[in-house]
Amino acid sequence: MSNNNPADVHVVFCTCPDAAVAESLAGAVVQAGLAACATLLPGAVSIYRWQGRVERDSEALLMIKTTAARLPALTARLCELHPYDVPEVIAHPITAGHDSYLDWVRQCTTTNA
């Protein structure tokens, strides 16, 4: 199945207020076939500007693996379910990777397993 174009696979970063929210979002997007995998990294600390003030919060980071084709639907679903007013949803195309893994991501996001 490998199409030798790793750029059609993306890693999406999404910060969450806690591990419970991150796990709920991860389950929802994987179950819906919008992502092949979501890795939850607890213990993130974000320092950011919000409404004119510098804030500092503990968060959990999701690293979500999907395809370019599923990215719009994934982004919409995350924004729909996320408790933040402006959730972080940042996608990066893969520039290189293990062909079998990238094929697995493609396969998981083209069928609702």
Image: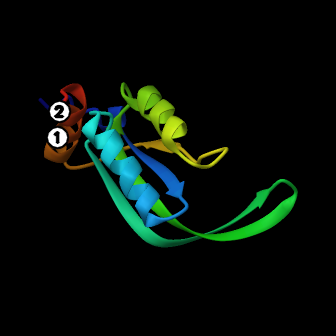
Mark 1 vs mark 2, CA separation in Å: 5 Å
In this rendering, the answer to whether 19 lies above or below 28 is below
At label 1, the amino acid type is Trp
Residue matched to label 1: 104
Q: Nearer the viewer, residue 41 or 82?
A: 82
Q: Residue at x 22, y 26 (%)?
A: 110
The image shows residue 51 at horizontal and vertical percentages of 84, 53
Q: Nearer the viewer, residue 87 or 6?
A: 87
**Location of the C terminus (image quadrant):** top left
Residue matched to label 2: 107
- Label 2 near label 1: C-beta < 8 Å? yes
- In this image, 53 relative to 27: left or right? right
In this rendering, the answer to whether 55 lies above or below 38 is below
For disc 1, the neighbor class at 10 Å (few under 14, some 14 to 19, many from 20) is some
At label 2, the amino acid type is Gln
The image shows residue 59 at horizontal and vertical percentages of 54, 66
The image shows residue 108 at horizontal and vertical percentages of 19, 35
- In this image, 30 relative to 90: left or right? left
SS at badge 2:
helix
In this rendering, the answer to whether 2 lies above or below 13 is above
SS at badge 1:
helix
- In this image, 88 relative to 96: left or right? right
Q: Residue at x 26, y 39 (%)?
A: 31
For disc 2, the neighbor class at 10 Å (few under 14, some 14 to 19, many from 20) is some
The image shows residue 4 at horizontal and vertical percentages of 22, 33
In this rendering, the answer to whether 15 lies above or below 37 is below
Q: Count how many numbered circles sit on residues in the image.
A: 2
